[in-house]
Structure formats: C-alpha cells, structure tokens
Image: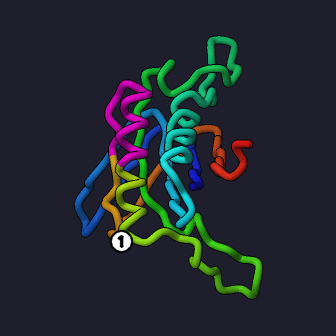
Amino acid sequence: MRIVIQRVREASVTVDGACVAQIGRGLFILVGVENADTDSDMEWLASKASGLRIFDDEQGVMNRSVVDVDGQILAVSQFTLTASTKKGNRPSYIRAAGHGLAVPMYEKFCSRLSEIAGRPVQKGVFGADMQCALINDGPVTIIIDSRMKE
C-alpha cells in the first residue's frame, strides 16, 4: 500500500462538475492499494499519516502533526500509485488491487485514519473520474510505502 501525503492550505474533489469533498488547512492523501496489501499495511499507514510531523511549530520547524494543528484530511483512492515503470514507457498496473480488495481497504484506511486522528476524513469517489484541486503548502509532499516499514 502506498500513500502520497501533501500538506495543503486547501483541497477539493469534483466529480461531474459537483464538489464532493473539500477541506481547508490539512492533509490531501492519495491512496494506492496493491494485491498483496493487508490490514497491517493499512493500519501502519493510517498511524503514520495521522502522526506525521510536517506542520510548523512556533519556531517555524516542522514539528506538528495534522492532529496538533487541528487540520482537516481528504483522502482519494488512486490506483496509478501502484504503477510499475521498469519496462518501456507504458506503466503497468498489474499490482493494483481489484475492486474486491481496493474498495474495502481504502474505506478501512479512511475509517481508521479518522479514528486515530479524531476527526472526519473527507473522501473522493472511488473509481470516478475526479478532478482534484489543491494548494500545496510549502510545498510539502511525502511518499510512504508500507513495504518500507521494516
């Protein structure tokens, strides 16, 4: 399982011209689920995301989490994070989980992140053609892969 976390001033997701999710200051998280992912991967990433200290403290040092700054969270499923680009120029998505695994894992990730962070997690629409808009603050962008936890 792989996530891309961006510290944002604001972010939104639009589907068919309608805004389906919107946040102010906080985290915009892209979530990619692979066939081999487990609840352990999901749990580890939810914990990492909620505790990641990427917000400035009073001295301007990135020392605070989204929880510490009372920030908001928006998570969007993105299967393209599972792309393999080893051969040729066309990405392979062979490792991407199908709907049977990806949907429940994404939903569990959002639910668990909400529990750990103590705040609701706004969500995109799984499988929809989404337009995501954000103002990346910093910019700060962190990539975390559950395969790298050990």
Q: Quadrant of residue 132?
A: bottom left
Element at label 1? loop
In the image: residue 145, left or right of residue 106: right
In the image: residue 84, left or right of residue 72: right
Q: Quadrant of residue 95?
A: bottom right
Region in magenta: 108-122
Identify the residue shown where x is 31% and y is 60%. Answer: 125
Magenta stretch mostly in which secondary structure?
helix
Q: Callout 1, which amino acid? A: Asp
Residue carrying label 1 = 129
Image location (x, y in percent) of residue 93 = 57, 77
91 vs 62, nearest the viewer: 91
Quadrant of the rendering where the N terminus is positioned: bottom right
Identify the residue shown where x is 30% and y is 49%. Answer: 21
Residue 30 against residue 28 in the figure, above or below? below
Image location (x, y in percent) of residue 23 = 36, 40
133 vs 123, nearest the viewer: 123
Image location (x, y in percent) of residue 36 = 57, 62
130 vs 84, nearest the viewer: 84
Would you say residue 135 is visible in this rendering?
Answer: no
19 vs 82, nearest the viewer: 82
* Residue 77 highlighted magenta (yes or no): no
Identify the residue shown where x is 74% and y is 42%. Answer: 150
Residue 145 against residue 33 in the figure, above or below? above
Identify the residue shown where x is 43% and y is 72%. Answer: 98
Would you say residue 82 is visible in this rendering?
Answer: yes
Q: Quadrant of residue 103?
A: bottom left
Q: How many marks?
A: 1
* Residue 117 highlighted magenta (yes or no): yes
Image location (x, y in percent) of residue 129 = 35, 71
| Extreme-top residue of the structure | 58
Residue 102 against residue 105 in the figure, above or below? below
